[in-house]
Amino acid sequence: MKPRRLSSGILLPSGFLFAGAAAGLKKAGGLDLGLIEAPAGTAAAAVFTTNRVVAAPVAVGRLHLRAAGGRVRAVIINSGNANCATGPRGLRDCLRVCEQVAESLGESRERVFPSSTGVIGVPLPAHRLLAALPRLLRGRRASPAALRQFARAIMTTDTRPKLASVRFRYSGSVAVLTGVAKGAGMIHPQMATMLVYLFTDIAATPAELRRCLRPAAARTFNRISVDGDTSTNDTVLLLASGSTGAHHPERKSKGGAHAHRRPAPADRRRFIAALEAVCASLAEQIVADGEGVQHLVRLRVEGARTEAEAQQVARTIANSSLVKTAWAGADPNWGRILAAVGRSSVPVDPSRIDIFLGAQQVCRQGAACAFDERRAHRTLSQRHFDVSVRLGRGRAAASFLTCDLTADYVRVNASYRS
Amino acid sequence: MKPRRLSSGILLPSGFLFAGAAAGLKKAGGLDLGLIEAPAGTAAAAVFTTNRVVAAPVAVGRLHLRAAGGRVRAVIINSGNANCATGPRGLRDCLRVCEQVAESLGESRERVFPSSTGVIGVPLPAHRLLAALPRLLRGRRASPAALRQFARAIMTTDTRPKLASVRFRYSGSVAVLTGVAKGAGMIHPQMATMLVYLFTDIAATPAELRRCLRPAAARTFNRISVDGDTSTNDTVLLLASGSTGAHHPERKSKGGAHAHRRPAPADRRRFIAALEAVCASLAEQIVADGEGVQHLVRLRVEGARTEAEAQQVARTIANSSLVKTAWAGADPNWGRILAAVGRSSVPVDPSRIDIFLGAQQVCRQGAACAFDERRAHRTLSQRHFDVSVRLGRGRAAASFLTCDLTADYVRVNASYRS
């Protein structure tokens, strides 16, 4: 959906404190430790990677959310190390870090939610994290500067922080939803991708949040792809503080953190729209900042029998190395798109397939049609462009956001660890 | 299987004539038209791409083989244009070329088997092919030089011709099997890949050839991958002239082209071994000459429940952009291999997975184990190296041949048409 109501500035949702610090996990000494503190009773919902290999923080995060009945008091995130394939030691390291954060806040360990991102298979230098925690905690603030520092601390190969905010009416107050993400590589849509943290000040139960988060993630984060690889650490976490209005001094909070009234249908609709708008913006920012990305491609597959079929075709195109390298060269080589459709395992009839580059049709009924090559090249030279494919099988459609595959992607990933 | 009995030189199977010519399809003016003439009655079997989008020559080749009862008199191949997504005109163009070859040989059109390789979606300049045919036909010879010229004529982005030969005992004579292939891009195992022509001088029925060719292709060409894309033109064609002994003047041919006796079990075994040896050599040559390839990687997946499961895991690793770019940098980043195994859709237990780079174990029971990084880097710096993964689920295994993903692959494919 269109993020129509996205705010141009970044808004601070009431009740949350943010911090970022350098713990010495990144070689260059950059920010690599991020903290969110939420008011007591903050409700949470999360979706995780579908990879069978999961990092220690994913296992611990799942466990903690369940044990705490969907309540989160703090989130602690490190970049520079994924704490994945680190065995029992990795789990112990993750628990120790959570424990120390919990102690500092006078909270139980289960209410601390951990995340990690970075290299796989290297033990987490937990002592560095533990040593940096006091400094990190001291720095926590409810300020835009602190939020931006947090957004920088969770970056790996990202070239810029990713934030999105929206303001919406909820239960008679003005509520805020703000999201922060990190992406760059290992991006492939499999029910939750990358690290995404969403904060809102509405009052909601964990169950309500879960009901809203799953479809929003499915329609945004699961419709993007950078390289077809699914990470072991992917996490999308949504927190609702219940402090609505606190940022709006003329209004008094009507709910508070523990208000569990069912939302009015109109409120619920506005919240879902806000959630999808923020998720869609973050998803787009993630692809746009994918490793080595020069072009952002909006794929639209129409005329499928089912939406799943349309998605299957879109994913096959989005992950074809040959299609993606042609895009890197702004080459209107639509034959590679047709070949990808043909191997998508959807039983297409090639003689019914139409392909468009931008507004221009380049393939009609499975065959070349006369088109202006220079215009097509100009279309593909733009930073953003559209590619659409019509299958001629039915009325279902799906959109998908992807990018080109450049020599820079190879460069970034050939020497990621060195 | 090991190509133990592969000949170091290229042998000429009896009865076949070869030619290569420049018809002006390639921009640089190189050889782009190849011809094979086989003796009357030569038996044939073929496997084709599983892509739903197929080029005109694949459709015509299938039709001709069926119409001629599996008999082929000539094969006509052009590079520089795939004649795919060219609609009814593409079919007409293909049929016209076959017709003219057939007329020149006094044969019916159905006994001419066509292939094309090159760019998709550009009409075949059939007039250039037709104009070059007389010259091509005049140049046909039963000589190693003509065979090499043919092998060059079917190349696209290949940097070198691909040939393999084996000599084997068959029905009291010495028989020869020689194969020629072109590969380079769009290489992904889906029941027949790329263009491969196999010639033998044994006498065999089309049905016998089919029975031997399918499993040989499945065990060789379907176990390799360059980029995960399946071409619209993939074809493997096996021809048996029945002229055994003709190249061996001291022996008289016992069979002849029309001998349809069932082969003795020992002969059949030797033929199948020869076929697999030649196919395995060509498959390896194709990966080794993949676009931009710097490293050739022998993947071995063991401890699977079924061979299909082992193959599924191997394919996921072989097509992971992140794994392949790490290989390009000789980076022992085994975490990416583990992550690929985790998303392969095989229900693995991560805590049972072992990974080896060369002979050195780098991951034990899903977690990092102490290993010599420099030794691992040396292993991955070699042109050929082995990677093995043990799943700890059962006793089935599969091997797979793949390569790294380099900036050169991107360069070659970003400007393929320009």
Image (cartoon, coloured by chain):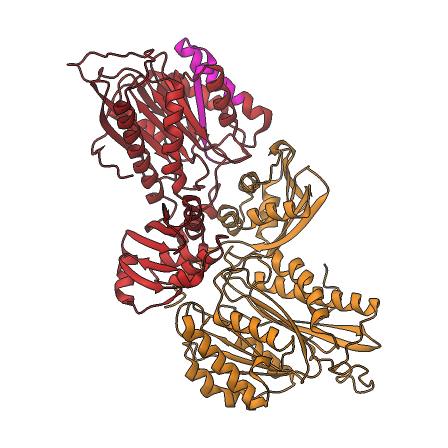
Chain colours: A orange, B red
Seen at 41% across and 70% down, the residue is A87
Seen at 48% across and 77% down, the residue is A94
Residue A84 or residue A390, whichever sits in front: A84
Say whether residue A180 is visible. yes
Residue B249 or residue A330, whichever sits in front: B249
> Which part of the image, by quadrant, shows the N terminus of chain A?
bottom right
Residue at far left of view: B250
Q: Would you place residue A416 above or below residue B214 in this image?
A: below
- Residue B108 relative to residue A34: left or right: left
Residue A366 location, quadrant: top right
Query: Horizontal and vertical percent for residue A347?
Result: 60, 37
| Span shown in magenta | B93-118
> Which part of the image, by quadrant, shows the C terminus of chain A?
bottom left
Is B391 one of the magenta-colored residues? no
Residue at far front of view: B394
Residue A58 or residue A266, whichever sits in front: A58
Query: Horizontal and vertical percent for residue B373?
Result: 29, 67
Decide whether the magenta segment is chiefly helix, strand or loop: helix
Q: Would you place residue A74 above or below residue A160 in this image?
A: below
- Residue A103 relative to residue A299: left or right: left
Seen at 49% across and 82% down, the residue is A97
Query: Horizontal and vertical percent for residue B402?
Result: 37, 47
